[in-house]
Image: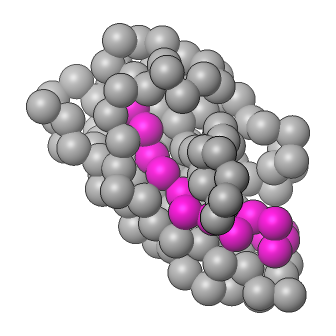
């Protein structure tokens, strides 16, 4: 059984920063590719960033490249998303996801464990 618990969301102004963390409860965290997704109101959940089992292999959606950074600490069973230069269009619920099958990529279907989500709101 794997549980994911996100934290770090909140309300910031345009240009600000937030740091999201995801604590993973489970014995095999270091073997899981991890991802962050987001879902804005009325929109589909979309891939934001991913990190493979052996960092630093990472993936980012184009709209966050150069602004967001994903990292993991296998000793602490955590994955982090540092978000800088935030824009109103980054407003969404952000979800942490884990792939227990070892599948790494941008597709939602690769990830089989999900957190409850954390709200990120960027004011203009």
Instruction: Locate residue 90: give its quadrant.
Output: bottom right
Which residue is farthest front? Answer: 42
List x then y, in percent, for residue 67: 81, 56
Span shown in magenta? 84-98
Q: Is residue 22 above or below residue 1?
A: below
Asked if residue 51 shows in the view, the reply is no
Q: Residue 108 in the image: state x and y as whole percent.
A: 54, 28
Q: Residue 72 at what x, y percent from top left?
A: 47, 40
Q: Residue at x 39, y 31 (%)?
A: 98
* Quadrant location of the N terminus in the rendered image: top left
Indicate whether 14 appears above or below 28: below
Which percent across, then down, holds residue 73?
A: 41, 41
**Looking at the rendering, which quadrant does residue 36 occupy?**
top right
Residue at the spot 21% in from the left edge and 44% down from the top edge: 3
Q: Can I make out residue 90 in this image?
A: yes
Query: Magenta stretch: residue 119 in it?
Result: no
Q: Residue at x 48, y 19 (%)?
A: 110
Residue 91 colored magenta? Answer: yes
């Amino acid at each position: 059984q794997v549980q994911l618990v996100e934290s770090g969301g909140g309300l910031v102004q345009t240009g600000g920063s937030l740091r999201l963390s995801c604590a993973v409860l489970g014995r095999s965290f270091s073997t899981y590719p991890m991802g962050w997704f987001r879902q804005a109101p009325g929109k589909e959940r979309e891939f934001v960033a991913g990190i493979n089992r052996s960092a630093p292999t990472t993936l980012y959606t184009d709209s966050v490249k150069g602004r967001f950074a994903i990292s993991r600490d296998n000793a602490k069973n955590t994955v982090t998303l540092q978000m800088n230069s935030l824009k109103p269009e980054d407003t969404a619920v952000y979800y942490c996801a884990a792939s227990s099958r070892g599948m790494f990529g941008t597709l939602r279907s690769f990830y089989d464990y999900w957190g409850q989500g954390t709200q990120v709101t960027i004011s203009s």
